[in-house]
Amino acid sequence: MNSDDRLTRSRGPALAWLTLSVLVIGSSGAADTPPDGVAAPAVSAEPAGARPQSGAGPASAETRQQQPLGPEDLLEISVFEVPELNRTVRISATGTISVPLLGEMQIAGLTAMELEGRLREELRKKYVRDPQVSVFVREYGSKRVSVIGAVGKPGVYEMLGPRTLLQVLSQAGGLTERCGAELYVIRNGDHREPGRIAVNVADLLANRDPALNVSIHPGDVISAPIDPLIYIYVDGAVKSPGRIEQLASRPITLLQAIAKAGGATERANLKKIQVLRQSEDGTQAVIEVNLKRMRKGRTPDPILRDGDLVVVLETFF
């Protein structure tokens, strides 16, 4: 009697039924899609009538089972009444797994159902007369997209099925008010597309440019750089003197700064407004502006810089 016959007889009829079970658990910790879509400064998030994404929450078991397997996917393998075959394995970078009795197998690109058929056939050839095999995926490490920067919920999100930029941003909680003028889709170049795609936020959201709502691929990184704050100070004959915070990508002019400070008082000398500006060498420059001429369009309204001090002098008569 050979070793194959001994293995079959020792297990008896139970060896005719094999179950490779895999539990489907989302590994990314992605949150549910917010109902309001992508939130962005002064613009609405999604095109009118659009939903954040189909299946933004956990994907159905059927959808997950139909996805091609790839490196970093995690499979939990168990065989009914044959505990020595139980394994939790992660697909290697080369697309292989190691299975007891069968050795190393190349499985990248197969779906769970296709892998099920292949395992059934290999076991039938060597060890089991009529195996029944089931394959489930515990974690899709090969199908993730990362969202970082000025979004509501930065993190790594599982991506099963096609997604667009707006859909993934919605799933990540939308853009915050600190988002800069541009965001970037960074990819590894496997898709014959640029390694970094720059997207103008206003054109994407406010102007509804469909060309900017690019398709997102597994492995992409969506980066929404946080716009730094600049600080302008307004003092003197204004109603609310103090510090003004402004996003660096949205510069503020002298007239706007005075308006944010509540406007000039009745005692303000509008012909002599001073802007005190620190130079790179440490010296201070004084820029004098006639606000009356500026309001009439005779002189330009200067753009203020980080650290500028606007002094609205008082008149003495």
Image (cartoon, rainbow, N blue to C red):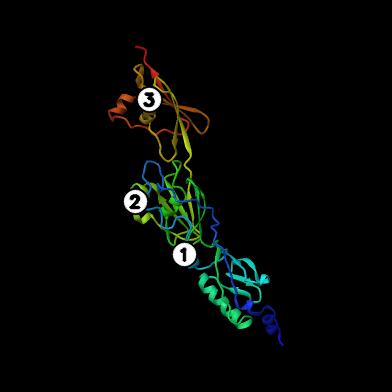
Considering every residue shown, the one lying at the far top of the view is 317
- Work out whether mark 2 precedes mark 1 in sequence or the reverse, and give the earlier one: 2
Residue 227 appears at what percent x and percent y?
47, 42
Kind of residue at badge 2: Pro
In this view, 198 is above or below 100:
above
Q: Is residue 109 visible?
A: no
For the residues labelled 3 and 1, the Cα–Cα distance comes to: 57 Å
* Callout 2: SS: loop
Label 1: state its secondary structure.
helix
Residue 82 location, quadrant? bottom right
Q: Secondary structure at mark 3?
A: loop
Q: Is residue 288 in view from this perspective?
A: yes
Total labels: the figure holds 3
Q: Nearer the viewer, residue 136 or 158?
A: 136
Disc 3 and disc 1 in contact, CB within 8 angstroms: no
Q: Is residue 100 above or below residue 44?
A: below
The mark nearer the N terminus, 3 or 1, is 1
Residue corresponding to mark 3: 262
Rounded to the nearest whole Å, what is the CA distance between mark 2 and mark 1? 26 Å
Question: x, y percentage for residue 187?
Answer: 49, 58
Residue annotated with mark 1: 63
Amino acid type at circle 1 is Thr
**Amino acid type shown at disc 3:** Gly
Q: Give the quadrant of the N terminus.
A: bottom right
Q: Position of residue 27 (x, y in %)?
A: 55, 57
Q: Residue at x 34, y 46 (%)?
A: 206
Residue 286: horizontal and vertical position, in percent?
44, 26
Disc 2 marks which residue? Answer: 47
- Which residue is depicted at the point 54% across and 73% down? 116
